[in-house]
Image (spheres, rainbow, N blue to C red):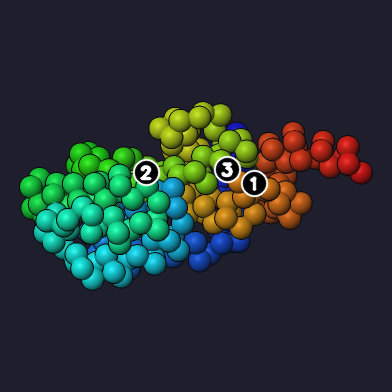
Amino acid sequence: MDRRTAGEILGILRGAYPGAMKDGRYHAPAFEALITTILSAQTTDRSVDLVRGRLFGKYPTPEALSRADTASVEEIIHSTGFYHAKARHIIAASKSLITDFGGTVPRTMEELVRIPGVGRKTANIVLYHVYGKNDGVAVDTHVMRLSGRIGLSDRKDQDGIERDLMALFPEDAWGPVTDLLIAHGRAVCTARKPDCGRCIINRFCRYYHETFLPQAGRSS
């Protein structure tokens, strides 16, 4: 896909999901944004929201969470899934914030990915939504799925997909691209049954032309 077509897709999605981009930042302290982003892996925002109040009510600072009992944290975050690993990660991340960064969430990709449980996806989300920085494109499961279906990238790995998206879209769109693809993936281009018939970008979509239309033709 060329950059012009990618730009058209971006413009259509911006118009369709204006609320998806918010104002570019989370309305939460950097520490909470980091921890909730780690917790959001393989689960829904709703699941994280349900445990957020209790978790930060009990452990409101990196210092508090760094000293937390693992079993206690696991009990709080159990409903988010993979709670054993997530509890270890968020406690270790809090310890790293204290020992390596003076208790504050760093502002660079290089520093963020040194924190346990933080990869480029999490770092990109924190940098954009907390600090308003476009250092890359956060590639989650929605972004991976839509990138392949639409034809934005043929790669299967997160790093490769991110590089392709960064080449297709201008730097100031890297943060919004993630939010918009996630919104479209939740509303229309779902994992199990994409609603291609009402998709607003189907004329640009490889899956629509190569898979949906031939199937529709056979069933008519």
Q: Are marks 3 and 1 in contact (CB under 8 Å)?
A: no
Relative height, residue 86 to residue 27 (above, below): above
Which numbered circle lies on residue 192?
1
Relative height, residue 107 to residue 48 (above, below): above
Pick the residue in front: 61 or 47. 47
Which residue in the structure is indicated by mark 2? 121
Is residue 43 visible from the viewing direction of this image? yes
Q: Quadrant of residue 109?
A: top left
Q: CA distance from mark 1 to mark 2?
A: 23 Å
Looking at the image, is mark 1 or mark 2 nearer the viewer? 1
Q: Secondary structure at mark 2?
A: helix
Is residue 112 visible from the viewing direction of this image? no
Within 10 Å of the Cα at label 3, are there few (<14), some (14-19), or many (20+) other Cα atoms? many
Which residue in the structure is indicated by mark 3? 146
Q: Residue at x 26, y 51 (%)?
A: 87
The amino acid type found where label 1 is placed reads Arg
